[in-house]
Amino acid sequence: MKLCTLYLGRMEFLRLQLIACQDETELVTSPTPAFLISHPELGLILYDTGNSPFYGTEYTQFIRETYPVVEFISIEDALAKKGFKPSDVDMIILSHLHFDHAGGLKYFRGTRAIKNVVISEADLKNAYYSIATGNSGAYIKSLFDFEDICFKPISETTQLAPDLTLFLQESHTPGVIGLLLNTQSHGNLILTSDTVYLQESFEKRLPPGGGINKTTDEFFQNLDKIRQMQEEHNATLIYGHDYQQLMDWVLKGWVE
């Protein structure tokens, strides 16, 4: 198995959206990542797809103002830099359906990957419920609700291969999918997605300061779960939007 971190641009917004802080005017640079996995048994797997190319018009005014996209790199262009096209991808795993993770799904319409989109059942239900009740938040229906998409929902820990396991988290949304991967060169890796945005969040037990979590209890419960997994697997954590860490992983290129 080989893993590659893809850089899909960045957003800039108030730091308190990522981590509780006293200065409510401080800004933070938040990268938009995706992860490409080349697996000997499962083929080419993509974990998340980044923002929509139509973020300026497709996103709600609230999202545009709260999480402005200041640099956009399409998942199509990021794949091309690695020598691939959307049609080469065999499976898409979405950590969750928020705009900066599901926005690039449109590039896969008409491909085999769009028929094989793994998602948490809880997050899928939450997305449609939120939209139907007028409380869509960071969900945008047009990003993922189109005719040829086929979701493959999971509701429990799912081992796709001995070196690739999906696990569910009940923070940020009711069912964020995290990844547990075993690599030869870097040992076990845990990708938390947005349940833990930053290394500082994990080390100092600091929840987001915005309103993304209904309570901080779910953040701390999930944090304890991640810490237990880290100790059990002696794993390195890769966080959801930690700029410096993710850029370091981008520079590593393919990791085996």
Image: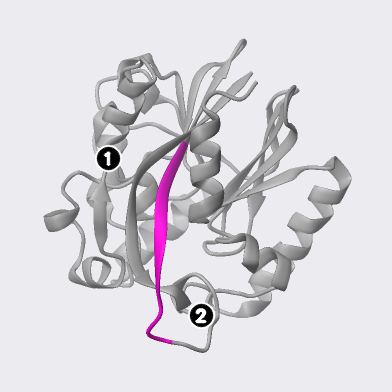
The reply to whether residue 158 is in sight is yes
Q: Residue furthest top?
A: 40
In what element is the residue under mark 2?
loop
Q: Residue at x 65, y 20 (%)?
A: 256
Q: 16 left or right of 27?
A: right
Indicate the quadrant where residue 98 lies.
bottom left
Q: Residue at x 58, y 46 (%)?
A: 177
The reply to whether residue 152 is in sight is no
Is 19 a magenta residue? no
Amino acid type indicated by mark 2 = Gly
Indicate the quadrant where residue 207 lies.
bottom right
Q: 198 left or right of 113?
A: right
Label ID, residue 209: 2
In what element is the residue under mark 1?
loop
Is 26 a magenta residue? yes
Instruction: Tell me the distance, in whole angstroms, between the alpha carbons under discs 1 and 2.
Output: 27 Å
Residue 250 percent coordinates (x, y): 49, 36
Q: Nearer the viewer, residue 158 or 147?
A: 158
Q: Is residue 223 above or below residue 109?
A: below
Q: Is residue 163 above or below residue 225?
A: above
Q: Main secondary structure of the magenta part?
A: strand
Question: In this picture, which residue range is highlighted in magenta?
Answer: 24-34
Q: Residues within 10 Å of mark 1 (few under 14, many from 20)?
A: some
Q: Is residue 199 above or below residue 19?
A: above
Disc 1 + disc 2, Cβ < 8 Å: no
Mark 1 or 2, closer to the camera: 1
- Write down the residue under mark 1: 73
Indicate the quadrant where residue 59 lies.
bottom left
Amino acid type indicated by mark 1 = Ile
Q: Residue at x 55, y 61 (%)?
A: 197
Q: Split into 4 quadrants, where in the image is the N terminus?
A: top right
